[in-house]
Amino acid sequence: MILGENKGMNIERKFHKMKKQQNSNRGSFFLMALWMVMATSGIVIFEPAPIDLGIIFLFMVGILFAKVSIRNSLSSLYMLLFAMIITNLVPLLLAGDKIIGIKYFAITLYLMLSWLFFIGLVNVYGDRAVKVIFSGYTFAALLSAMLGILAYLSLIPSGDMFLKFGRATGLFKDPNVYGPFMIPIVLYALVKLEDVKKTYRFWWILVIILASLAILLSYSRAAWGSYIAALVVYSVIRFWIKPNIKLIFSVIVMGGIISIGLMYLLSIPQIQKDMTNRFAYQEYDNDRFAHQDEALQIALSHPLGKGPGQAELVLNYATHNSYLRIWLENGYLGLLFYLLLIISSIFRSIKYALKTKNPLYALAAASIVAVVINSFVVDVVHWRHFWLVLSIPWFAHPSLFKRVIDEPVTKLTIKETKIRITS
């Protein structure tokens, strides 16, 4: 009788082991698909981009097979997201061109869902998902960076495909998006420099150099300013997490390398000419400021907003300012809820960086600050990577709650209920 019971228990153990292995394999396939989708995130020369189709597909699969988990501890955040949707829908009823309004709102809604997708994904897979996301993102950034750099230096045939107005664009339509897209990858490379063995550090240094060069050759003044701001914010929070002489030395060395590299690049006549031109006051700046003043007057006189996607129709010109655009299109409450999302995300990033000692949250804070700066001169609401970095502060998997390198790992317990989305 005892032998029969033992045999039955062994069979049951083997069954559970096989089932666990099958689930692990399914998870690996899902994460592999995620990497492939993220690897296309730098290909946005046409709409919808490959990453859009990929995320929609993965989100549906995640819902059907419980690869996405929603935590009710973030219910207040979901309410804020719902309020933002309402402040898009109500003005949509007042929109002059409802077809454009519906199309613009649909894109905004998709990006909000992508934000939810990344949060739900990390709730299930934790640090594994984060590594896959940024591995794919790094590949995409380097591919686009290399194409832009080589095209600018006239080292590849048909290089004009990867330039716009003589500025590096890579596989993007706009150099003002191409440059900022590289910033989170530079910060991620800084995180990895502390985390990997010495033999792999050269690789991440190369990533920093290539991404930084791509930012430079995008000739986006906003990208330059936000890049510097992001480095400063990341360094301050990172040092705040754990005062480290080695970190200070690394920052000084990196600053020296970037300065020497910049001096060398400025000795190249073409780069020197283009840099001088970009720092000069541009003729179109007058048009921008005039239309921004007009946008402000319209926003003040329309409390509910003019409707999603209506700014260009009303002004016959882009606002080149995300805050004015949201105010004009979504009204007072739309702007308020958007600012609440941004501010709460930054504060949560800083809070979790100090609480968990994980530099990923410092990366999030610095990346969001970079986008906040860009928002004053560019429309950023439909930047895909913006919604990705905006999701990071809300990652709450125990595997992310660790201390910095060289300190013992401590797992924190999260007392919250998980709602699994199952078929």
Image (cartoon, rainbow, N blue to C red):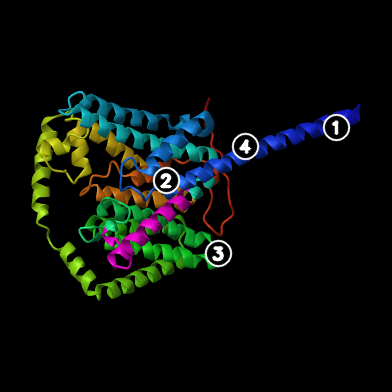
Question: Mark 2 is on which residue type?
Answer: Lys
Q: Which residue is mark 4?
A: 23
**Quadrant of the drawing holding the N terminus:** top right
Please say if the residues under marks 4 and 1 sit with CB atoms less than 8 Å apart: no
Residue 418 visible in the displayed image? no
* Residue kind at label 4, given as amino acid type: Asn
- Of badges 4 and 1, the one in the foreground is 4
Q: Secondary structure at mark 2?
A: helix
Question: Quick one: label 4 or label 3, which is nearer the N terminus?
Answer: 4
Q: CA distance from mark 4 to mark 3?
A: 31 Å
3D distance between C-alphas at marks 2 and 3: 28 Å
> Mostly what secondary structure, the magenta segment?
helix
Q: Which residues are magenta?
A: 133-160
Q: Position of residue 401 (x, y in %)?
A: 52, 46
Q: Is residue 323 visible?
A: yes
- Residue under numbered circle 2: 351
| Residue that numbered label 1 is attached to | 6
The residue beneath circle 3 is: 197
Say whether marks 2 and 3 touch (CB < 8 Å): no
> What percent of the width, then of the height, locates residue 391?
40, 41
Q: Position of residue 195 (x, y in %)?
A: 52, 59
Question: What amino acid does circle 3 point to?
Answer: Lys
Residue 397, relative to residue 247: is it above or below?
above
Query: Which one is earlier in the sequence, the residue at label 2 or at label 3?
Result: 3
